[in-house]
Amino acid sequence: MTAAGKTAAEPIYMDYGATTLVDPRVVECMLPWLAGQFGNPASGGHAFGWRAQEAVERARAQVAGLVGADPAEIVWTSGATESNNLALKGVLQHPQARGRHLVTVATEHKAVLDVAQWLQRQGCALSVLEVGPDGLLDPDRLREALRPETALVSVMLVNNEIGVVQEVEAIGAICRERGVLLHVDAAQASGKLAIDLRRLPVDLMSLTAHKTYGPKGVGALYVRRKLRVPLEAQMHGGGHERGLRSGTLPTHQCVGMGEAFALAAAEMEAECARLRMLQQRLLRGIESIGGVQLNGHRERRVPHNVNVSFEGIGAEPLLESLPGVAASSGSACNSASLEPSHVLRALGRSDELAHASLRLTMGRFTTEHEVDATVKYLQASVARLRAGQSGN
């Protein structure tokens, strides 16, 4: 096995945007809580529960540390999807909500867009804002969309498909100016961007472990202490997490997320510099093929993401012709759909180019050799597919 946990026969992993492997150091921290340390962190009457509770609270502080939050502002969830549901439904369904109008963006993850559409069916007003060709939201467009009854704005910090970074500070300033709450889905941002919630005007932020070398099935919602409107809980039964999210906490998963976020805090600067170098190396190699369009802003993007469209071919034939590379044609959550990416459509890409897109995402264990090998696979596959189509 290699450091990345794959055998020599497996393809090169270029799908870190879908999930990361669990860092071996994280696994090591989790193991004791899967065996000898089995107490319920809600059991306050004996040492087994106390030890589990201490581990959970230490992990909560580690998660808070990466994003500049107070540990008391971190609510454990099962992942970013649940965090998004709790944030959007929690605000819009609360009796004290300022209004019943939600504003979001056309390029959001389905875990936000689907919730927004569900709320609309329940009687909420919904505004979905378009982005520019570079994938960025114009803050003035947001300003124009706000109404007296707007309760919440939800904007993704880093887009999961194209990797662009939204201007959350400017967006948050507009929301504060108008007295509107701001929710940010940061699932793809943790460990890749410096986040300081003591400074950012953000009220709610969704986080997940498995995009940052932690285990699947655990996440968190940051809830600013001075949140002006309480959240309506979506899960009931025991009053865990200050009544916001009932359910026995999985100590081992919380410990894993905490350790993963602590490692990210310690290593992010050096890791991002290395990934930026690999990103430029990969992009140069791909663009040398010709007939390639980079999707999303060239500079305002995270260092691990390259999303490109190839003229003259489709994404599925390209993926099928790349047995040596594990990549994707969009979000892993939409992989069963035959529809072209809603994100690329929102950028103004034609259905043909949207279908012919490829998302390559790198991570902690990606090497220069793997980047160069990926370029060679792509050069050969694109040339073969284009030659086959020109002969038809």
Image: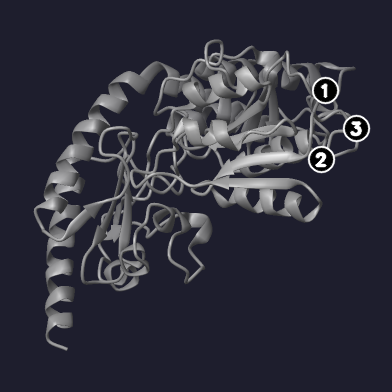
Label 1: how many residues lie within 10 Å, few (<14), some (14-19) or many (20+)?
Answer: few
- Identify the element where label 3 is drawn: loop
**Residue type at numbered disc 3:** Gly
User: What's the residue at 61%, 18% (across, down)?
Assistant: 177
Q: Residue furthest bottom?
A: 392
Viewer-proximal residue, 53 or 37? 53
**Residue type at numbered disc 2:** Gln
Give x and y (percent) for residue 7: 31, 53
Label 3: how many residues lie within 10 Å, few (<14), some (14-19) or many (20+)?
Answer: few
Task: Tell me, yes or no, if residue 369 can be seen here.
Answer: no
Label 2: how many residues lie within 10 Å, few (<14), some (14-19) or many (20+)?
Answer: some
Q: Residue 234, which numbered label? A: 2
Q: Which residue is mark 1?
A: 242
Number of residue marks: 3
Model colouring: one colour
Disc 2 or disc 1, which is closer to the eye? 2
Q: Is there CB contact under 8 Å for labels 3 and 2?
A: no
Disc nearer the start of the sequence (2/1): 2
CA gap, disc 1 and disc 3: 10 Å
Disc 3 or disc 2, which is closer to the eye? 2
User: On the rendered structure, is 2 left or right of 171?
Assistant: left
- Identify the element where label 1 is drawn: helix
- Identify the element where label 2 is drawn: loop
User: What's the residue at 11%, 58% (across, down)?
Assistant: 289
Picture layout, residue 294 above or below residue 255: below
